[in-house]
Amino acid sequence: MLILLAPSEGKTPPDGPPADLEALAFPELGRRRRLLIERLDRLAAGSPTRALAALGLSAGQAAEAQRNRDLLAAPAGPAGEVYSGVLYQHLDLGSLRGGAATRASERLYVASALWGVVAIGDRIPAYRLSMGARLPRIGPLAAWWRPALAAALPADAFVVDLRSGAYAAAWRPAAGTLVEVRAFTGRGSARRPISHMAKAVRGEVARALVERRARARTPQDVAATVEAAGERVELVAPARAGGAWALEVTR
């Protein structure tokens, strides 16, 4: 089972030794990772206006673009500590103990515009690059990553998908099972999707799945685990063969 998390724009600068690209999960992605690191370094060293435009940042975010200078020499730390957004606050990795902490290290992965996919414990620097960025001679990053991710990640994987749409567009298991987690509020005809707090729901779903000792092997297992954690859930089967299951969590 792969539990795929979205990254977060918010990052806590780490203070450990620099990252080792060869030690990251899915080392087959190393060439593309290195190419993006080089492109980001050139952008950060060049015209600030051009860098901000490519990264989709405002003038007030110029310091964010400078995070991308010399990333291979920058301090690094575990991805689960570097990413600090709402999802990671509700996942609360630091409070996991024993078997739950071990299962988190084995099951949790993060989709990334820079790294492709990394394990939650992989050591990375703080950086600024979203899947919506347009880097010179790269184009849309989801499309650029797609063939490399298809070759590196298991085509028959069972995936619990906690990514946002932009990151989900980069990879789906061609012959596996995908369970997308969606968040809603209200009841009956007043039920509606929620956006920002969907990240909180996804963080809590991820936590429930690593706290459970047994590995979820079916969409029904995932639904039962999340329901046992106290959530109201509905499991929706794919509308067509090969489509994604939807786990709808209503608050």
Image (cartoon, helix red, strand yellow):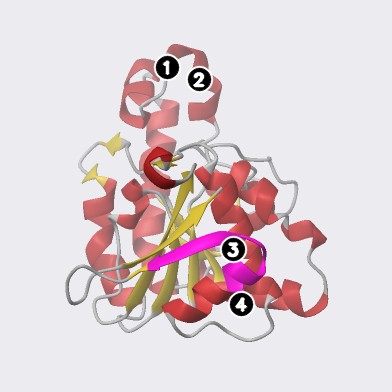
User: What's the residue type where badge 3 is placed?
Assistant: Ala
Does the magenta portion include 100? Answer: no
What residue is pinned by disc 1?
58
Question: Relative to 69, is 238 on the left or the right?
Answer: left
Disc 1 packing (10 Å; few <14; some 14–19; many ≥20):
few
User: What's the residue type where badge 4 is placed?
Assistant: Glu
Disc 4 packing (10 Å; few <14; some 14–19; many ≥20):
some
Task: Point out the tag, 3 or 4, that comes first from the N-terminus.
Answer: 4
Which mark lies nearer to you, 4 or 1?
4
Task: Point out the tag, 2 or 3, that comes first from the N-terminus.
Answer: 2
Q: Which residues are magenta?
A: 225-235
Q: Which mark is residue 61?
A: 2
Which mark lies nearer to you, 4 or 2?
4
User: Residue placed at 35% from the left, 71% from the top?
Assistant: 178
User: What's the residue type where badge 1 is placed?
Assistant: Ser
Give how far apart the Cα atoms at labels 2 and 1 are.
5 Å
Question: Relative to 129, is 166 on the left or the right?
Answer: left
Answer yes or no: do the residues labelled 4 and 1 have beta carbons within 8 Å?
no
User: Residue placed at 59% from the left, 37% from the top?
Assistant: 10
